[in-house]
Amino acid sequence: MVAGQDYVFELAEEDKKAYITGQGRGIQPGDRIILDDDAGKYQVEKIDYYSNPSDMWIALVKVDSL
C-alpha cells in the first residue's frame, strides 16, 4: 500500500456510507476524502488507526454532498 495513492473501498450496509482503508497521518473525523478515480467525495465520520503500521487506518465515511 502506498500512502496517499492506494486504498481499499468497501460499501457499508448503511445507505451512502462506506469504509475506506488507507495510510497517512493526521486524518480526523470531519475531514473530507476525495478519491482520485472519480469514485466520489466522502466525509470521515469515524476513524481507527492500526497499531502496526501506525499510519494505517480504517474510516467510516459518508457521501459528501459539497
Image: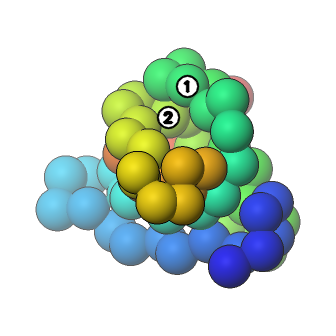
Amino acid beneath label 2:
Val
- Select label 1 or label 2 by which is in front: 1
Q: Give the farthest residue toward the left.
A: 13
At numbered mark 2, what does the secondary structure look like: helix, strand or loop?
strand
Q: Residue at x 37, y 41 (%)?
A: 48
Q: Which residue is drawn at 52% across and 75% down?
A: 8
Give the CA distance from mark 1 to mark 2: 7 Å
Residue where numbered disc 2 is placed: 44
Looking at the rendered image, the quarter that the N terminus falls into is bottom right
Q: Which residue is drawn at 65% across and 58% down?
A: 23
Left or right of 51? Residue 25 is right
Q: Which of 38 and 61 is in front in this view?
A: 61
Left or right of 38? Residue 61 is left
Residue 2: % across, % down: 78, 74
Residue 64: % across, % down: 57, 36
Residue 14: % across, % down: 19, 52
Q: Nearer the viewer, residue 51 or 49?
A: 51
Residue where numbered disc 1 is placed: 28
On the question of residue 64 being in view, the answer is no
Amino acid beneath label 1:
Gln
Q: Do the residues labelled 1 and 2 touch (CB within 8 Å)?
A: yes
Q: Which of marks 1 and 2 is nearer the N terminus?
A: 1
